[in-house]
Amino acid sequence: MQLSFLEPLLGRRGPWATVYFDPAPHDESGAKRRELVVREACRRLEEEGADTATVQAVGEALSSVTPQEDPAGRVVFAAGGEVVLSCRLSRPPRAPIACWAPLPRLTPLLELAGEDPLCLVAYIDRTGADFELRGAAGPEDAGHVEGRQSPVRRTASADWSERHFQLKVANTWDHNAGEIAESLRSAFEESGAEVVVLVGDVRERPAVLERLPEAVREVTVATEHGGRAAGSSSPALEEAIEHARREHVQRRVDTALDRFRAGRSDTGGPADAVEGVPALVAAAQEHRIETLLIRSDGPELATETWAGTAPDQVAVRRTDAQTLGEGDPVAVRADDALLRAAAATAANALSLPSTDGERADVPTGGLGALLRWTHETSAA
């Protein structure tokens, strides 16, 4: 997950109100439930010490969230009587989250909005293609391309003139495959999509695929379900698209974990990856974090650290924070402090799935990082 969108939160001192909100279904009972959830979130903020102006701003923002525009909900960050940032979620929180703390509560955002790769779906036939973006906000038109419209159909005759006609048909197919591939490449780059799904004509799909640039071809999959014609969508096609998105996320996680295992040092020698709060805090102070890895069930996420106004003013001990130039540091959660520091240095963050038998507690404590440059660790 790229963290640049968090920039409005970085240079502003708290405390912060953070609410992760799931809108109820769009019916009468849903409207009543939304009202109750908003009221409860505001009550909780007040109990934790939030000021009246900030609570009122949060309540107004949450009341404007609708299931039509934000089916999975939104997160609201507010301080000083105003909403500073509001973001759409790609999946609803399992339970409402409302807290008042020195820093914005950022970590749930990775799981609820971070792993939602945009998918560019290309509906192809032998005359052209329609492009559609799929993400948390639902389907969105991404353009279309039309190639030569004739000739596009072959005949079964063995007559010389018919064979000549069939050759012209094949040339039309090839030409159109090139046109579609070029338009698909352009749509992929302009849309910010991370994965591509080819849908439609069984002959044209591989012809388009082989004409795509390697970087696009590597993230492209094809499905036999569906087509370009209206009404050709099906549950099987929807599942194929979601499967492609899930597989892309899994490959990203696998690649990061492989790099992490290869990069960490158990001997005190040079390391390209670190784990544990003290090592991560040191990396954050020196702007060395390239990708922050967070496992939501990690026991060290809530470890007490100390933070100042500047994002890189983060320390394991209060006295350490003061030596960094912060006269009045505050106690904060390690995960939120590290995420804020990572965002300030254009680093990325990746949410890892819960521990299992093959990846038992990797990284240790649930927090780790891939580094921008090799670091000389010190032996214990």
Image (cartoon, grey):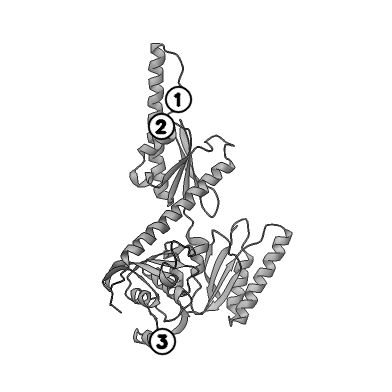
Q: Position of residue 333 (x, y in %)?
A: 47, 77
Q: Position of residue 91 (x, y in %)?
A: 56, 59
Q: Nearer the viewer, mark 3 or mark 1?
A: 3
Q: Amino acid at mark 2?
A: Asn
Q: Residues within 10 Å of mark 3 (few under 14, many from 20)?
A: many
Residue ID at (43%, 33%): 204
Do labels 3 and 1 touch, CB within 8 Å? Answer: no
Q: Position of residue 362 (x, y in %)?
A: 42, 67
Q: Earlier in the sequence, mark 3 or mark 1?
A: 1
The answer to whether residue 63 is above or below residue 219 is: below
Q: Secondary structure at mark 3?
A: helix
Residue ID at (37%, 25%): 171
Residue ID at (62%, 81%): 47
Q: Return the residue at label 3.
A: 318
Do labels 2 and 1 touch, CB within 8 Å? Answer: yes
Q: Which is more toward the observer, 213 or 236?
A: 236
Q: Secondary structure at mark 1?
A: loop
Q: Earlier in the sequence, mark 2 or mark 3?
A: 2
Q: Amino acid at mark 3?
A: Arg
Residue extending furthest toward the top: 159
Q: Residues within 10 Å of mark 2 (few under 14, many from 20)?
A: many
Tell me the distance, in whole angstroms, between the alpha carbons under discs 2 and 3: 65 Å
Q: Which is more toward the observer, 3 or 337?
A: 337
Label for residue 152? 1
Q: Amino acid at mark 1?
A: Val
Q: Secondary structure at mark 2?
A: helix
